[in-house]
Amino acid sequence: MQEQITRLSLLPNHSLFGQVSDELEDKIDPESTVDGAFAVTLRRMGINDNESDDAGEEEFHFSRPDEDEVWFPHGSRTAIFASSLPHWQCLFMLDLLDNLPRLRLSDDHLKAIIWVMRECKTPNVPSFSSLQKKQESLTREVGIKSEHHTSSLGNHFYMTILQSFWPWYFSGPVSEAWQADKWTTEADLDDLSPMWAHWEDKSWSHRHFYIKELVQLCDGTFAIPLCWITVQNVVYANVHMVESFEFNYLDLSSFLSIKLTGSSVVFSAPQYLFIDDIESSPHYPMPHPLRATARWRPMFRNVSKQYNAHTNMYVTNLNLPHQKLQQEYFIRFASTSPHVSSSEQFVALTQDCVPGTWHEAYDCELEQEILFEIIEHQSETSSHIGMMGNLRCRRDDAGGSKEDCETNEGYHAMYMVCSESSRAPGKPRDVDATVQIIRWEVWMACFANKSALEVSSTSTGVKDKISQHWISVLVEKAKAAHVEQISNKDTCNPQLNDPRCKGDERTALKTAIKTQIATDLWDWVVQQPNEFILLPVNDLLDPHRDTPVEILHTYLLGNDKYVWYDTTKTWDPKKGDKNGPIFASRLQSASISGLSIPPPRPRYVVQYKNSLIGKHFKMLQQLGVFYLHDLCAPLILDLWKATRELGAYLWFPEIKNMDVYIGKLHVLPHTPDDVRRFGPCIIFATKIFECWNAVFRLCSILSNHLAPSHDIATTLADMEHFKHMVSGGWWCNPTVEYIRAGSSVSSFLTSNRELQRRLGWSEKTALPCGTVKLETVKKREPTEWNLPVREPEPVGSTWLQCKYVSARTGDLCKPGFWVFVQMSGLPLPFPARIQIILARQGAPLTPGNAIVIVEPFIILDVKNPRLNMPLLVPSTDATLMAVNPEKDIMLLFNVQHDCVHCKCKADSVRVQQERTVTDRTELQLVHTPEQVFILNMHALHNAYLIREILPRALTAPIPYLQDRVASHHRFAAQLRETGPAKRAATQAKTQATKAKNKEGGEPNPSENYREIRYHMPLCVDPGTCSEGKNLCFSEGLWVTATLW
């Protein structure tokens, strides 16, 4: 039993993790949904709901479509309706309407649409039941399945089987290499792709080259590849070169590790006659064990990742480019339940990620079956108590009691990183240590020792959601056993009724009885197959390290929100405060070119300052600091500058110099480690999951909530089958034949941008550099050349005004926008403001027939002293320049007018309402003509490119505290003065409240608190319980706490 408990990895498939049941599938009553109950009621009233035309319909399976069946599977004559042939395009369009994620239709809506179509004499309109039967058959044929689960806590829910849709990622071309340390340096080689084949050459595609298996190179030498990687679209292998090779023997001591291109490999081990005679090393078994499983089919591993803390569980595929992961189309729904916690759902999810389980899929490019394995990569919980404990960080043991945090060392440690590579005090949390603490808490529950449990959770920060349920059960059982065997004289141990048993002897007897009770309860818990849960262990999963800092909730809705609250908490117009309206009038004049944000709506932001959401804080991140002068304390303004500068770094989409970048992120202690292991922060942002919640809510509205998990899973499964078909995906029919939808269906998504938008898929393709677009006919203003710039050849043309020109980065740059320009002959790029974009009238609209007129600016060597940002002023010659739109315009950036230096003032302007200028006026900041601008270093768009262009002296962060340690010691000294006073006041208030609530009683501090001291073991050996002995504890630590 000790071995079974210690080896937790043996337990994931145990029934104690919950049950998968098919019984309830047949118990879903048609009346359990709103529309089903409504239809039954109509039939009882003698109304047939206009579905009589479906009589005699027969169901058939799909076969491979003929070339002329363009609307297959909605229009195959061998499909499900043999006796009636509705208009196939009409049936497809109705299926489309029913599967738009953000435009959910109820059954009554669809019936009304069908009714209107029939009233309009539309020919061959299918009935509602025909549509439903078609959808059910499509979902069944495509293979999307939802299983009923019963968690160990007795909760019921449905979960979509992961392998139902993971094969789809291979039935459409996908490629991107994961570059962060998590998969390039930390992952075991066996958890990466096990093989490679030369897919581009069909004559070689049957040769599969496995890792850790002997291969022959083109030059006749031999090697053993360890992993396959892709660098700039070229496949390489890290290999051990075999310098000494004799028949039946490999000299493993003389290996040389090098990198080779995949095309250098000629033969793999199965091509040699000596396979069966090779003396294989335990590290290099030959041939590769997966060859027998694959049966010559290609094999891949898929990495799934999930970042969500709600009762909805979504998953994404990390093999997709991160631009795709930020689109709703690629979010996959796993499960939901109003009753089941995320931990219970996660246990069910891991059943689809059993290591060593390979699933079949069809590769549309290779046109053959392949095998893939799902590796679960993220945990929804770190068994952490959160901010309620003394050790508040889920990543390390930073923190302590309030008194500890007020010491010089304790306060400074809160700002340091506790990691394996750091020298900071403390240490990172360890999975094994966390499991041991959870087991120790379960052992304390066997003693009914609530005080020890409370101290443990508070002092260690460990509080596992699943174990808390069973801890409560054990505490109640232990209490009952204590009453029965100790307190109740009728049922207690006979020795306790002996008057001679007293003093130390009686105390020792009670202790022995409690220990025996605890031992019996421990054995009972361990031996219950469906009652006790231990989290499965995965070598690739460390819940403490694999839960990276998430910038939406941690930063925008965390740090930025707190700074905004501290700035605006006194902005109350009812008390005569005018700071809010002044800030709104200033923000209204802000330039948003180059920011990729909508207009800021400043008056709404100020009016509802305590109810803002992520998009508002993202706008304030980039604009707020420019307009807060004289509206907040200097210390608050310094905090704005620091948090906004850091925010710009957090939103980098690409990191070229990791070491330099990491050095700038030390303010958020664990973010550097996350960026090294997972890549840029925006990759593991959860904003897209928050957006996808809107789709879930629409599905939930149309459920009657009698079986919400089942209803929503079924609805979203229908949606997934539709997305798979219209995107050109393949699926396997019951005859083991891979088929796809007809040409009209499979190409509908790629050719219809409206459907792409409604399904949440955006195929953004950057326009070629120099692409221009003419203004509308009314705004083109044909004119002769009258600019103080030499007219391009040929002269004498008529010029038309253009709306925008595309830069190298794909940015659409309009007149008035700010860009960096790099002209041939000039050593460095320079900033400029676009004045006008012109194109020749009558000539083809190409970059060669267009010209961009810009006003050049220069960047001063000194920064703005108030905001620590570069300053822009007009060039000394103050002349316009003509630049080549095809290659000179680099990128778009944002600037703000230096209103403090230029003394801009607010003035009354007329308000526009309903697109009409009214006689009402409001204050708005009016900029002076003086041209002094500040380059916005808080902007998120192109932030990393701007810092590559600017000199290092203008972008290097400046430490706010020159002597950080001394400053922390000074702050800690202040806390040691204010902290005890605040705690004493809180304690006095608490005591007064308790005394007031206690009838006729005076407050007695000695009755309300007590100091307790417990030994916290670092190791528990539960195996001795079955022998009736005491548990063995290794060297641990003592925990002292005061409980009120």
Image (cartoon, rainbow, N blue to C red):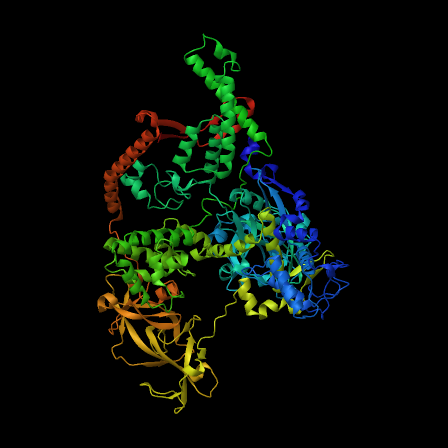
The reply to whether residue 631 is in sight is yes
Q: Left or right: where does residue 334 sit relative to residue 135?
A: left
Of the 4 image quadrants, the one containing the C terminus is top left
Reply above or below: 372 against 739: above
For image coordinates 49% across by 20% down, the residue present is 483
Of the 4 image quadrants, the one containing the N terminus is top right
The residue closer to the viewer here, 650 or 687, is 687
For image coordinates 62% across by 61% down, the residue present is 110
Dividing the picture into quarters, in which one does residue 930 lie?
bottom left
Reply above or below: 495 against 894: above
User: Where residue 565 sits: x, y (%)?
Assistant: 32, 52
The residue closer to the viewer here, 607 or 481, is 607
User: Where residue 327 sits: x, y (%)?
Assistant: 51, 60
The reply to whether residue 365 is in sight is no
User: Where residue 850 sits: x, y (%)?
Assistant: 42, 83
Outermost front residue: 45
